Amino acid sequence: MIPGARLIILGRQGAGKGTQCVRLARHYVVPHISTGDVLRAAVREGTELGQEVREILESGGLVGDETMIGVVRERLAKPDAGTRGFILDGFPRTVAQAEALAEITAERPIHVVIDLDVPREIVLERISSRRVCRDCGTNYTSTGSDATTWICDVCGGDVTQRDDDTPEAVNRRLDLYETQTAPLIEHYGNLGELVVVNGVGHPDNVFKRLTDVVESRR
Ligand code: AMP
């Protein structure tokens, strides 16, 4: 296993991206940088950033490019990202963010951009049963009505449904994905940096497809 992978994982929210990114981060021993997790933590902690983005997150909208670029610039400047690499999950989400990222990573370019492809209908099904650890971001699948909070197997944190996993917010995010984020696929495709990976199937099979792509590109 070669250390120092620098990856971007794109895909619709609920495509299984989060779970696969957590797993890839453990496999390659690199930090998993989820901009959604960073923002949710800021909201929980009531920081200035949290106050700025709280309502946008609840409604399923997109946080402004300038704010997001600042968040990622600051995170990628930390030593672990420089020495060990990183997996970016949820960023970039617009072409403007992608252009800023190219500038931020100019000295150590991204190895590969992966589009984890799962059709919208399947995503809607998955999101309604999604439960997430508030502390470490591990995803779980609910099998029925579970009103009580679970405890995370990985870190002992609270496992709950995300506030923005309501049908209205989910549909809004999926619409935004089509208009704002899908052009990124074309952007990275034109640059020859994109690999589309089929995200449908057993998570172990999807993980194997992802690591095959990473190994072939490094
Ligand atoms: P996620 O956990 O990636 O689904 O992100 C949750 C929410 O955080 C999104 O619905 C957006 O409101 C916000 N967010 C996360 N990453 C970004 C980004 N790169 N650009 C704009 N908004 C973002």
Image: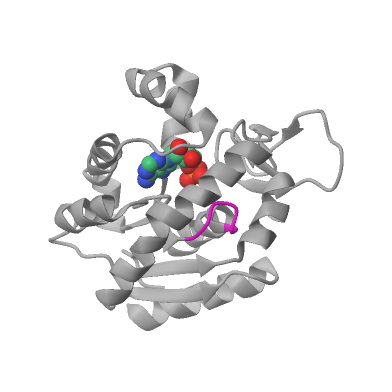
Please provide the residue range marked out in magenta: 11-16
Q: Nearer the viewer, residue 196 or 82?
A: 196
Q: Residue at x 59, y 66 (%)?
A: 118
Quadrant position of residue 7:
bottom left
Image coords of residue 91 (percent x, y): 37, 50
Q: How many discs appear?
A: 0
Image coords of residue 196 (percent x, y): 46, 75
Asked if residue 13 lies in the magenta stretch, the reply is yes
**The C terminus - image quarter:** bottom left
| Ligand 1 quarter of the rendering | top left
Identity of the residue furthest to the right in this view: 145
Asked if residue 14 lies in the magenta stretch, the reply is yes
Asked whether residue 30 is in view, the answer is no
Asked whether residue 159 is in view, the answer is yes
Image vertical order of residue 131 relative to residue 16, above or below: above
Decide if residue 117 is on the left or right side of residue 192: right
Q: Nearer the viewer, residue 169 or 199?
A: 169
